[in-house]
Image (tube, rainbow, N blue to C red):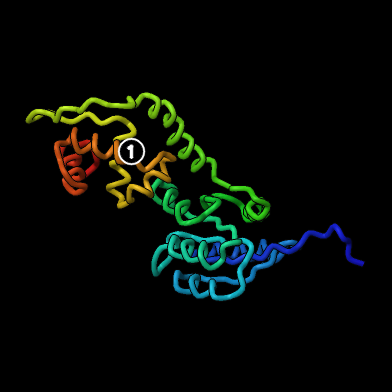
Amino acid sequence: MQSSSTPSLIHVALVEDDVHFQNAIVTAIAASPDIRLMSLASTRAQGLQSLESAPADVLLVDLGLPDGSGIDVIHAAHTLWPTCAVMVCTAFGDEAHVLQSIEAGASGYLLKDSEPENMLHEIRSLHGGGSPISPLIARQILMRFRAAPAAIAAVPTAPAATPAPAAGEHAVLSAREKEVLELITKGFTADEIARLMQVSQHTVQTYVRRIYSKLNVNSRAEAIYEARHQGILAA
C-alpha cells in the first residue's frame, strides 16, 4: 500500500539545446521518484510551443538557444503558466542576462557548473518556494545592491543644480547616476529601472535630470553619446 507521506510528483519542462547537458538532466530526472519530465524542447520555437500544453510545476530554460533567446520563453511562461516556477540554467553569467531573466519572471538562476544530482535538489528547492542562485550570480547581486542604501542616503532631498562641465572637462557621475545611465543604454524604461533599482520612478527621473545636466544634454541618445565620448561608458 502506498504511504500517505509519499511526496507528490514535480512536473518539469526543459528547454535546452546543449545535448550533453540535456541528456544529463533527462537521465537524472528519470532516476528520481518524485520528479517527472513533461516536455523537452531544444529551440525557442519548441519552447514556446510546449507552453500550449498543461502547465508544468518547474520550467528549466537555457538562454542561448539556436533560434533566439530563452528570455522570450520565460516571458511567455510567466503569462501562460503563472503558477510555474522558472529557473534559468545557462552559461551566461553577465549582469544583463541576470537582470533580464529576473525581470521576465525567473525565480532561480544557475550556471552550468552543477552536477545533475545537484540540479534535482535545486528543482525541489525551487518548487518548494526557494530561489536557487549560483554563488557567482548571488555575489554579483549582493555587490550591486550593497551600496544602494548608502548611495540613496547620500542624495540630498533638494539638490542644487550641477553646472555643466566646461569644454575639455569630463562630467563626474555618482555611482547611482552611472547605474541609471548604464540601464538606459541597455534600453530599460524609467519604470523598469525603478523596479530593478528598487526606488520610485520619481527618484529615477531625478537621476536622469542630473545626468542630463552634468552631461549638458537633452535626450537619452545625446546622454549615451556624450558619456561614451567622455569615457564614462565603454564605447
* Image quadrant where residue 149 sits: top left
Rendered-image quadrant of the C terminus: top left
Q: Amino acid at mark 1?
A: Glu
Out of 56 and 204, give the one closest to the viewer.
204
Which residue is found at the position 54% from the left and 41% from the top? 135
Which residue is found at the position 43% from the left and 52% from the top? 92
Q: Position of residue 182 (x, y in %)?
A: 30, 43
Residue at which label 1 appears? 179
Q: Residue farthest to the front?
A: 158
Rendered-image quadrant of the N terminus: bottom right
For label 1, the SS is: helix
As drawn, 162 above or below 66: above
Which residue is found at the position 68% from the left and 52% from the top? 128
- Would residue 180 be found to the left or right of residue 37 on screen? left
Q: Residue farthest to the right?
A: 1
As drawn, 59 above or below 131: below
Out of 227 and 109, give the one closest to the viewer.
227
